[in-house]
Amino acid sequence: MSIKPAIFLPELLRHLFKRPVTVKYPFEKEPVPKDFRGNVVFDPPKCIGCMICVNDCPAEAIEIIRVSETEKKFKMLLHNDRCIHCAQCVDSCPTKAYHMDSEYEIAAFSRRHLKIEYK
Ligand code: SF4
Ligand code: SF4
């Protein structure tokens, strides 16, 4: 069965003047939606050590560690290999010590490289 040019030619000509629907990723990064949940980011000075985030995280991905006996200072160890990017920690923290960034290229060859320490 042969296809007559009259059938596909108009379609072909129409598409000659349209932008491609595919994107040039990874050579060009596309913007992410406003509420995209990338990596958890922690702001240590805001932390009061209440441990609500540790208790609320469904993936047990957060460790809060006291770094000074005299001052109330804390660091956070994020196990990004466990994090499911649910943003519960962002919602739970009473001092707004967390936010999510817009990063989505977070794959690594080893789980070791997915531990992030914020201090
Ligand atoms: S985004 Fe969810 S899974 Fe990841 S650290 Fe926060 S509460 Fe835990
Ligand atoms: S919920 Fe917020 S203030 Fe409390 S330990 Fe976690 S990060 Fe610190």
Image: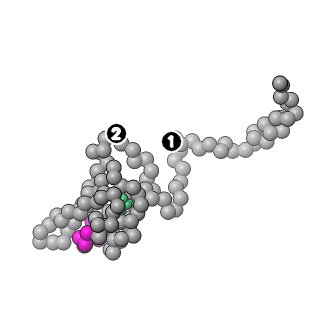
Colour pattern: one colour
Q: Residues within 10 Å of mark 2 (few under 14, many from 20)?
A: few
In the image, is residue 98 above or below residue 39?
Answer: below
Residue lying farthest to the bottom in this orientation: 94
Quick check: is 1 in the magenta stretch? Answer: no
48 inside magenta stretch: yes
Front one among 78 and 20: 78
Quadrant assignment, res 68: bottom left
Label 2 beta carbon within 8 A of ligand 1:
no
Residue 114 visible in the shown view: yes
Residue type marked 1 = Pro
- The C terminus lies in quadrant: bottom left
Q: In the image, which is nearer the foreground, mark 2 or mark 1?
A: 2
Quickly name the residue at label 2.
109
Q: Is residue 45 visible?
A: no
Upstream in the sequence, badge 2 or badge 1? 1
**Considering the numbered disc 1 on the image, is that residue within a helix, a strand or a loop?**
loop
Q: Which residues are magenta?
A: 43-51
